[in-house]
Image (cartoon, rainbow, N blue to C red):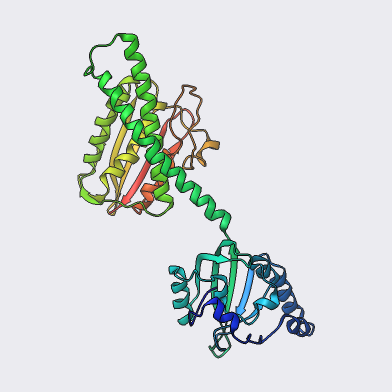
């Protein structure tokens, strides 16, 4: 918890006459002896929990702490008798410009609950990240009588988040930028702009390009995953006929399909325009169609279909005639870093993120995604977007 009234400095607080607690711990211990069993159970639970818990009295000057459990004393490094009677701002020391403090003060002034995370300081000066939930307590007449604060040290989680952020930064700047240059140089050799090369060199260039493209997809998928999980992924919606994205996907994947001797077939059963992000729907269809190509036998068709199962929805389907998906694999399909398995043992590659990201992108559109498959009967991956 934090400051709710004035911004008195820590030194000024120490010079003030200590505020006498309304209810001391020994007082509570004496009183609870006479409480019914259920209240005794509640008291023992609060005393025993590993969450730091404080209770304050907003009806007394400066909203003092009138109770804290042993876990809070351990968290802060202060003895219980050094805590009772103080305002919770003592945990912030002079670090009181945090925006979360203003948010807490606003919630307390309005007698509203709030959950936030802010920097606090132990008695020895060590900083820790405190995940705090403050809840108002009202009596039977609706009068505000107390605030309860529940605290958790989430410093380890914050450190993990910092390291993850550094990891993404390395991927974005230290890997993607040079890899883009490498990829560009390889394509210059492949298209002959750098001069003719013999067949064995060209074969190695194509292998290097394939691996370079795969790494670029992995980096893009990981960065997309970061944005999705952070809730920062924004769609750029446009109203377009669905055939536009089908044509884009077929044109993009024609070379891959030709290598596998697969025919891409489009079936368009609606011309009605739809509000969607074309780049992201292309990304979804690319993921689904690439999988279909990889798992289809040579000479087979992969069908990209658009239809309207109802007046308010549009369904995109990718249909293959591959080996199908074993029943025990179905539940794992849309998880992170999951790859399809089948009786076909050809190497498939892939990042293991494509289906998870596809599902997330469909859900950002307010739609849903699914699959119908059986061993030996191929698979149909589909998603619906609502008008």
Answer whether residue 357 is visible to the viewer in this image. Answer: no
Of the 4 image quadrants, the one containing the C terminus is: bottom left
Whether 30 is drawn above or below 271: the answer is below
Of the 4 image quadrants, the one containing the N terminus is: bottom right
What is the x, y in percent for residue 110?
45, 81
* Residue at horizontal 42 percent and vertical 53 percent from the top: 230
Whether 139 is drawn above or below 361: the answer is below
What is the x, y in percent for residue 86?
60, 80
The front one of 307 and 149 is: 149
* Residue at horizontal 51 percent and vertical 40 percent from the top: 332
Q: Is residue 171 left or right of residue 329?
A: left
The front one of 55 and 89 is: 89
The front one of 99 and 357 is: 99
* Residue at horizontal 31 percent and vertical 44 percent from the top: 280
* Residue at horizontal 55 percent and vertical 91 percent from the top: 141
Answer whether residue 140 is visible to the viewer in this image. Answer: yes
What is the x, y in percent for residue 140?
58, 88
Q: Is residue 153 left or right of residue 3?
A: right
């Amino acid at each position: 918890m934090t400051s709710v009234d004035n911004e008195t400095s820590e030194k000024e607080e120490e010079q003030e006459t200590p505020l006498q607690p309304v209810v001391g711990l020994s007082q509570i211990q004496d009183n609870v002896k006479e409480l019914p069993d259920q209240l005794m159970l509640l008291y023992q639970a609060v005393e025993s929990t590993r969450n730091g818990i404080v209770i304050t009295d907003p009806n007394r000057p400066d909203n003092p702490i009138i109770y804290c459990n042993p876990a809070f004393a351990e968290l802060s490094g202060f003895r219980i008798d050094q805590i009772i009677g103080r305002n919770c701002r003592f945990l912030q020391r002079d670090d009181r410009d945090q925006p979360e403090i203003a948010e807490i003060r606003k919630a307390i002034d309005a007698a509203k609950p709030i959950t936030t995370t802010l920097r606090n300081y132990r008695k020895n000066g060590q900083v820790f990240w405190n995940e705090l939930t403050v809840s108002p307590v009202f009596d039977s007449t609706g009068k505000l009588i107390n605030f309860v604060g529940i605290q958790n040290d989430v410093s380890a989680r914050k450190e993990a988040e910092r390291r993850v952020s550094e990891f993404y930064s390395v991927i974005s700047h230290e890997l993607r930028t040079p890899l883009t240059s490498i990829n560009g140089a390889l394509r210059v050799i492949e298209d002959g702009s750098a001069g003719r090369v013999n067949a064995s060199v060209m074969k190695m260039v194509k292998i290097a390009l394939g691996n370079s493209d795969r790494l670029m997809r992995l980096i893009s998928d990981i960065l997309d995953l970061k944005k999705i999980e952070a809730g920062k992924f924004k769609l750029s919606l446009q109203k377009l006929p669905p055939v536009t994205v089908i044509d884009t996907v077929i044109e993009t994947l024609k070379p891959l399909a030709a290598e596998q001797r697969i025919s891409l077939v489009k079936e368009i059963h609606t011309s009605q325009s739809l509000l969607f992000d074309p780049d992201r729907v292309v990304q979804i269809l690319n993921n689904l169609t690439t999988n279909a190509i990889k798992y289809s036998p040579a000479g087979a068709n992969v069908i990209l279909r658009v239809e309207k199962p109802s007046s308010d929805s549009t369904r995109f389907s990718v249909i293959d005639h591959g080996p199908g998906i074993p029943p025990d694999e179905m539940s794992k399909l849309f998880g992170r870093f999951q790859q399809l398995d089948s009786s076909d043992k050809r190497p498939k590659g892939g990042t293991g993120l494509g289906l998870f990201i596809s599902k997330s992108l469909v859900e950002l559109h307010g739609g849903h995604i699914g699959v119908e498959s059986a061993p030996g009967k191929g698979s149909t991956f589909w998603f619906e977007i609502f008008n």
